Amino acid sequence: MSTPTAAQASDLPVNIGFVVYPGFQALDVFGPLDPLNMLSMEVPLKLSIIGPTLEPVSTKAPPVVPTVSPDFAQSIVPTHTFASPPKDLDVLIVPGGAGLMYPVELQQAQIDFVKEQYPKLKYLISVCAGASLLARAGVLDGKRATTTKAGWAWTTSTGPNVNWVPKARWVVDGNIWTTSGVVAGIDGIFAWISHVYGEDLSLKIANTFEFERHTDASYDPFADVWNVSTSVAAQASTGQSA
Amino acid sequence: MSTPTAAQASDLPVNIGFVVYPGFQALDVFGPLDPLNMLSMEVPLKLSIIGPTLEPVSTKAPPVVPTVSPDFAQSIVPTHTFASPPKDLDVLIVPGGAGLMYPVELQQAQIDFVKEQYPKLKYLISVCAGASLLARAGVLDGKRATTTKAGWAWTTSTGPNVNWVPKARWVVDGNIWTTSGVVAGIDGIFAWISHVYGEDLSLKIANTFEFERHTDASYDPFADVWNVSTSVAAQASTGQSA
């Protein structure tokens, strides 16, 4: 493996956890997870998939989300529950998904879990609208963060005290990495791997995946596609969102 | 939805199946699957996850594959088995993965399944080294196809009668779409969605996923990264591989 750049080898993260919940977005999990699968072949890592129960967790959207194929969904198997999580998690990764359209009471378990785990983590990473769970847990208050551009208005509304960055592929503030929508999570995890384990290893995995990374965190054509650049940037620059 | 371009609306594919087997590459499945999750919200689709049994299928690599974290893996839940598949599959998607390093006898069930299903399918799609299962099923014989550039030598060796295209993000020959390594499967599925359901819908989903597609099937920087461009192209041009 390449030489770690951002941490002493003895302090490298080992225990990686993913939060899953009904209606999670599949690629918000598997986009970051599969590069970690490959990373795990070269550095010692342990994986936990943490859900409400040990029953398989489906991507199926809640009834409130309009769809013509309500049964088109797939399930992943948790290894742990929010009530009995693994000890000593180093990294927690939180996906978005249509499940965020459930009433907030039904999301409280994962919000509480983020809140409870954050003080013990080396890194907290969100993908897409997963940032809303971090925001609702209060861990983004006063911090810079980004999220999905397609669901910008709703997601940012969950964190009135967050300094939302509208034009960013991902944002790092302290040990919290928030990425923009879905595939931005793949760029984000490769940037994180580069930061923690070294660029050589990140590039090696990206080449095996035939993935052309965006390595500039501020690169974001989708802010324009979804028209969030100007309106919210102006708001952020006047401090109204913080 | 946008106007279908490549098929009459009455003839659009509905029943989508994914092959899974122990040691499948997670993103080879979820890279194409998650855009289909979103497509299913706009057009009627049914999903089947087809495995050896109904037990959860793990990404865990076989013991022969070198890794320092052998237990770093996750599991997906099949809906059907190779022995009792859904009727009337329209599309079958076949991932690669380290599981292909199991002895070929242990892969025979999925090879036979591809062989048995292909004559009834509207489309057959492979991602990464999943092309080896198609090759071993004989359905690529005499056809143009591509596969992972990182694992080019091994995968192409499974199909001596296939006209392997070394420099391609994906290749279409008749109703068989073969894509290059891992993330190329995401470009491939968006190209396929565009072909079948129209470019408007494909672009809409890609924008929601914040995915910058490669829309040129011949674009392939990874053929050079993995040095397969010249050696095998020369071979193909002299017909030695066909």
Image (tube, coloured by chain):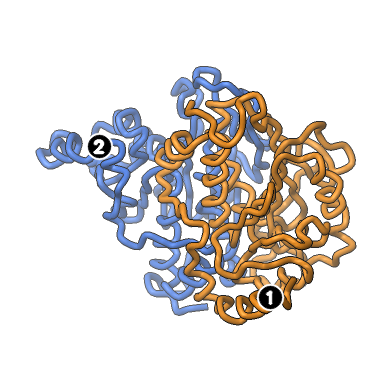
Chain colours: A blue, B orange
Q: What residue sits 77% from the left and 42% below the top? A: B50
| SS at badge 2 | loop
Above or below, B193 against B57 in this view is above
Q: Position of residue A177 (x, y in %)?
A: 36, 52
Q: Residue furthest front?
A: B238
Residue, disc 1:
B153
Element carrying mark 1 = helix
Instruction: Provide the chain ID for the residue under circle 1.
Output: B
Is residue A220 found left or right of A27 in the rendered image?
Answer: left
| Residue A83 seen in this snapshot | no
User: What residue is at 43 percent from the left and 45 percent from the top?
Assistant: A127
Asked whether A109 or A239 is in front, the reply is A239
Return the residue nearer the eye: B20 or B215: B215
Give the image location of residue A179, x and y in percent. 37, 48
Measure how far apart labels 2 and 1 are at the Cα level.
Answer: 46 Å
Residue A228: numbered disc: 2
Residue A50 appearing in the image: yes
Percent across and percent down for residue A134 are 38, 39
Choose top left, top right, bottom left or bottom right for residue A191. Answer: bottom left
Q: In this rendering, would A159 be left or right of A8?
A: left
